[in-house]
């Protein structure tokens, strides 16, 4: 613990003078403004109707109505019985917030990084006639401030905090905690010099417990202008115990004063009535729901008010609970401010007894002029990346989005904005990664602010009334993988930048049902005209855009047209609608990457040097090594000509791979359908399958590091997400496993083998599924197994198994010694809190245990029994992204102090317990003999707690 008195000297006077001069100038300005007045004050009378400000009688400050600071809530007058002649006008009305969990005032035009005093005032006054004073939480920005516990109708409550404001605005939020409707009477903001209240910094704020002015001659509050910082000093007079001292002479602030107690307050003081006694007072710890042992800061202000004769001495000790608070005997300076304070908060004491005792040498009793007591709050929560906030705020304003769009978009997670997904990394502010504003009644053009959401992966603006053209600036969003504009009134053509992104496979653009959109360089097709063509039969239509006579594939095509065409597709000239495999003619001779080449069998012989080197064995034949004319290495999957099996799979894969492209799906270069011969030609994936790497048989030996594993997991997840989300209708891979994830020379993961991939027909709920269960033992979704109906969640399940393989370095089915599913194996160990026991020892500790824990948690959620409880691949991608950011934050594997995992949309502990409960209640017994290994699922042990952070 450290105590000190301010000592150093510096000029602070001119600033004060400026404040006073400026104050005089503000009196006439009576328009409501959502920004500070000329002395930097913001003074709001919450619930005041109209737009006119008024001047407060005592402070002469101009109070503005609150409409410019908030767009929610409603105005109410307090009940007349609580209005007394002296009650400040501010308390006559309130704004209350019956709707929404969080409602925030936004105070703008601040200086980022400066200290501000924020003061919220409340008087319930039975404004709602319910006679039920509420309890709710207050947040300053994204940090918890305090609980507003309104205990009765009559008390005027003042809650104050001093914080560093990290941005050029601050929000004060009222959060409904289920104990009544939040309301507020007034809100003030006052700037403070950075040198004031040194206990306040970027990570710690102060919350006022009490600010006492001892011994005043009248009982009015001291505020502005007597205190230029407009702190509220509460008078404390107790003539029975204490004598008052006072002076009319000005008490000067010492230069570089850390607290600048105002002269008006310092001009009065108390001494004990009985000169031999001490001055004693105390405060009690007030445990908060969110901070059971708050830390306290005390600041005691002293000034000698009597000009003492030469032989007189006033000297005293200051004790806290019998121990010295300040180590030396203290003598206040004559008519100058002095203070003692602690820098590090006291904690864990229930009552803080302060005693001020004269020393033996003292001829005069002790004295004190004022005291302030604060509790400390942590302000370490970081708001969403500010450019994301300004972009989404502009979007909210443009479209007048209602929802729960209040406060910070991502923080705290429990109050994040509906329709947004955010990523949370430890070292960086949260980012907005997806925006879903479908069916939100948006009008007008597409806001250019979308292009400022630089971390966004997924933007869904489908089914609104958006008009105008599509801004090309969206193509600059390098992370954007899905842009859904379906079902709007957009016009113009697809901008070239976006087209380019769709061509290189980095973006899936959906724009069906925009009747006025030109999707062809020359003409605008219209829905009407296409309807007249009467394409009512089930025909796969390829989403293709023709530009300058080059046919370019966009994304997924497997849209079936049942009730008339709804998409904007233009078919390539030569495609036969009924053909499952494109003839290839439409794609020939094009230099674009997307076009697939058609090979003859002869060419394949040349490419593979007569099928000399076998790379592996696929479902319907062997895979050969080959080289194109230009030297590009390729893999050629040749269907065995004797086998009838695999034709369907071959066709399915060819059909899909000619039409979908994504950086995490294995790229097909071409195909061959030459008489009996069928082959697919892929880009060569030099690092082979993920399975080989997990087993430690990677091409250059060695084992994958944790970071490599995470990246592979993320990329594979992105590939699957694309199938599920980027394709319309969604595709189910149905055979996700470590051998179907291929790695290129850069160890980038690509999903392969689409032979079993199926499209889900969303329009037709009566779709009949085949009776054959497909997939690979150890990876098959038990629900699919039971229902025979694969869903996208079946892929999620299989992916969870792959993720467990990455974490553990073990195969999907272990021999332990009995065949055991890896899922069960991991669950059993985690149940005993043995996280290190599941981690692949070959990573040699180059991992952060919390990151691994989180990944394991994701995997276990993916492999939940009930598909409804599994996350979507979009969730998985976001979570893995967090893991990777976490890993990269703790760069080099160095375990940075305090870098343990805390943040995600799900608390890993609660998530795990929820999972365990799930495993317990669903006792699935499966009958099929083919998949008997899966039967182990019913015996999931309960998870008492998760492992502790290292
Ligand atoms: C509040 O009281 C004022 C008069 O003091 C009156 O003009 C106003 O209409 C009242 N507002 C409401 C919402 O009752
Ligand atoms: C609110 O105040 C009352 C009375 O002081 C107290 O009993 C109660 O525990 C407080 N509630 C909270 C949530 O602080
Ligand atoms: C504070 O003082 C009171 C008497 O004034 C005493 O009863 C109490 O024990 C003291 N508390 C501590 C923590 O010293
Ligand atoms: C009290 O006075 C004596 C004699 O003048 C001096 O030695 C001693 O240091 C003084 N004590 C304090 C606490 O100032
Ligand atoms: C987007 O929002 C719509 C409507 O609220 C909802 O139906 C849809 O499932 C959401 N999409 C995603 C990916 O969450």
Image (spheres, helix red, strand yellow):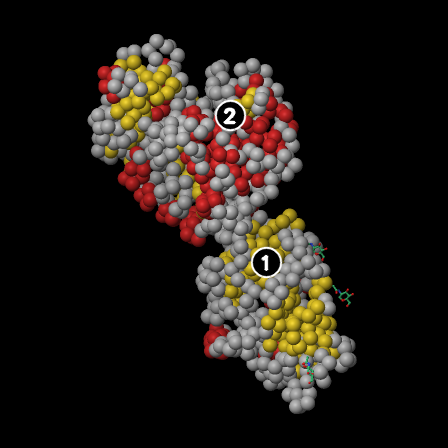
Residue 531, by quadrant, is top left
Q: Nearer the viewer, residue 703 or 489?
A: 703
Residue at figure coordinates x 69%, y 87% from the top left: 312
Residue at mark 1 to residue at mark 2: CA–CA distance: 47 Å
Residue sitting nearer the eye, 564 or 25? 25
Q: Position of residue 110 (x, y in %)?
A: 46, 63
Residue most extreme to the top? 642
Q: Is residue 750 visible?
A: no
The residue that label 2 is drawn on is: 812
Please name which of the two marks, 1 or 2, marks the residue nearer to the observer.
Answer: 2
701 lies left or right of 371: left
x 68%, y 58%: residue: 348
Helix, strand or loop status at disc 2:
loop
In the picture of the structure, the residue carrying the numbered disc 1 is 377
Residue drawn 34% across and 9% down?
642
Instruction: Give the x, y percent position of residue 768.
Output: 48, 17
- Where residue 414 sits, quadrant-wise, is top right
């Amino acid at each position: 613990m450290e105590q000190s008195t301010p000592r150093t000297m510096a000029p602070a006077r001119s600033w004060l003078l400026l404040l006073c001069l400026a104050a005089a100038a503000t009196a006439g300005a009576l328009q409501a403004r959502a920004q500070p007045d000329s002395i930097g004050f913001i003074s709001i009378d919450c619930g005041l109707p109209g737009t006119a400000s008024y001047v407060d009688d005592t402070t002469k400050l101009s109070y503005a109505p609150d409409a410019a600071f908030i767009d929610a809530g409603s105005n109410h007058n307090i009940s007349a019985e609580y209005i007394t002649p002296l009650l400040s006008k501010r308390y006559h009305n309130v704004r209350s917030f019956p709707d929404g969990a969080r409602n925030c005032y936004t105070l703008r035009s601040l200086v980022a990084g400066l200290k501000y005093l924020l003061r919220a005032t409340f008087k319930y006054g039975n404004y709602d006639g319910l006679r039920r004073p509420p309890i709710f939480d207050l947040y300053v920005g994204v940090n918890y401030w305090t609980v507003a516990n309104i205990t009765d109708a009559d008390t005027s409550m003042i809650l104050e905090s001093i914080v560093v404001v990290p941005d050029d605005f601050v929000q004060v939020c009222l959060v409904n905690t289920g104990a009544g409707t939040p309301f507020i009477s007034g809100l003030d903001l006052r700037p403070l010099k950075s040198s004031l209240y040194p206990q306040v910094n970027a990570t710690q704020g102060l919350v006022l417990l009490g600010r006492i002015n001892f011994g005043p001659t009248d009982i009015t509050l001291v505020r502005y202008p007597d205190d230029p910082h407009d702190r509220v000093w509460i008078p404390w007079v107790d003539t029975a115990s204490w004598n008052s001292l006072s002076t009319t002479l000005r008490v000067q602030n010492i230069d570089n004063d850390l607290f600048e107690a105002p002269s008006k307050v310092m001009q009065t003081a108390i001494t004990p009535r009985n000169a031999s006694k001490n001055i004693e007072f105390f405060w009690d710890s007030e445990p908060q729901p969110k901070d059971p042992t708050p830390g306290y800061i005390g600041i005691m202000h002293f000034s000698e008010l009597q000009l003492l004769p030469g032989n007189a001495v006033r000297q005293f000790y200051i004790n806290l609970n019998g121990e010295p608070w300040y180590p030396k005997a203290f003598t206040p300076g004559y008519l100058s401010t002095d203070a003692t304070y602690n820098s590090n908060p006291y904690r864990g004491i229930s009552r803080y007894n302060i005693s001020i005792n004269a020393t033996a040498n003292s001829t005069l009793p002790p004295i004190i002029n004022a005291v302030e007591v604060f509790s400390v709050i942590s302000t370490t929560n970081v708001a969403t990346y500010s450019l994301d906030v300004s972009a989404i705020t502009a979007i909210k304003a443009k479209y007048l989005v209602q929802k729960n769009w209040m406060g910070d978009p991502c923080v705290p997670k429990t109050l994040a904005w509906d329709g947004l997904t955010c990523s949370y990394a430890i070292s960086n502010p949260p980012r907005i990664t997806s925006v879903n504003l479908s069916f939100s009644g948006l009008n007008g053009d597409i806001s250019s602010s979308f292009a400022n959401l630089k971390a966004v992966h997924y933007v869904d603006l489908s089914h609104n009334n958006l008009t105008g053209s599509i801004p090309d600036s969206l193509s600059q969003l390098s992370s954007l993988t899905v842009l859904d504009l379906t079902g709007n009134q957009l016009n113009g053509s697809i901008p070239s930048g976006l087209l380019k992104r769709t061509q290189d496979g980095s973006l899936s653009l959906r724009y069906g049902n925009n009747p006025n959109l030109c999707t062809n360089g020359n003409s605008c097709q219209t829905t009407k005209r296409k309807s007249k063509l009467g394409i009512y039969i089930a025909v796969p239509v390829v989403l293709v855009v023709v530009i300058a006579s080059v046919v370019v594939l966009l994304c997924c095509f497997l849209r079936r047209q049942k009730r008339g065409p709804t998409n904007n597709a233009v078919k390539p000239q030569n495609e036969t609608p009924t053909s499952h495999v494109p003839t290839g003619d439409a794609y020939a001779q094009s230099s674009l990457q997307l076009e697939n080449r058609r090979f003859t069998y002869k060419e394949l012989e040349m490419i593979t040097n007569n099928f000399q080197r076998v790379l592996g064995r696929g479902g319907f034949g062997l895979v050969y090594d080959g080289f194109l004319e230009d030297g590009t290495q390729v893999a050629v999957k040749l269907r065995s000509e004797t086998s009838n099996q695999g034709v369907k799979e071959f066709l399915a894969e060819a059909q899909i791979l000619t039409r979908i492209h994504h950086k995490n799906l294995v790229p097909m270069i071409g195909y061959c359908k030459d008489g009996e011969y069928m082959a697919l030609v892929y880009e060569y994936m030099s690092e082979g399958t993920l399975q080989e790497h997990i087993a430690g048989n990677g091409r250059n030996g060695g084992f994958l590091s944790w970071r490599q594993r995470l990246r592979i997991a993320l990329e594979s997840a992105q590939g699957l997400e694309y199938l599920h989300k980027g394709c319309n209708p969604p595709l189910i891979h149905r055979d996700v496993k470590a051998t179907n994830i291929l790695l290129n020379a850069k160890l980038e993961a690509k999903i392969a083998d689409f032979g079993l991939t199926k499209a889900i027909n969303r329009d037709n709920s009566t779709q009949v599924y085949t009776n054959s269960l497909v997939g690979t033992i150890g990876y098959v979704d038990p629900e699919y197994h039971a229902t025979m109906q694969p869903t996208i969640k079946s892929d999620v399940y299989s992916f969870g198994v792959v993720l467990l393989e990455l974490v553990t370095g073990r195969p999907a089915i272990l021999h332990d010694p009995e065949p055991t599913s890896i899922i069960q194996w991991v669950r059993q160990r985690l149940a005993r809190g043995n996280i290190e026991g599941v981690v692949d020892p070959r990573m040699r500790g180059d991992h952060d245990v919390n990151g691994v824990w989180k990944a394991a948690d994701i995997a276990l959620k993916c492999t939940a029994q009930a598909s409804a409880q599994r996350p979507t691949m979009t969730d998985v991608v976001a979570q893995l992204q967090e893991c990777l950011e976490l890993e990269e934050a703790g760069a080099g594997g160095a375990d940075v102090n305090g870098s343990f995992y805390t943040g995600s949309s799900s608390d890993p502990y609660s998530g795990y317990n929820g999972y365990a409960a799930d495993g317990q209640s669903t006792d699935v017994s499966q009958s099929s003999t083919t998949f008997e290994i899966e039967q182990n699922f019913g015996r999931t042990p309960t998870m008492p707690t998760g492992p502790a952070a290292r």
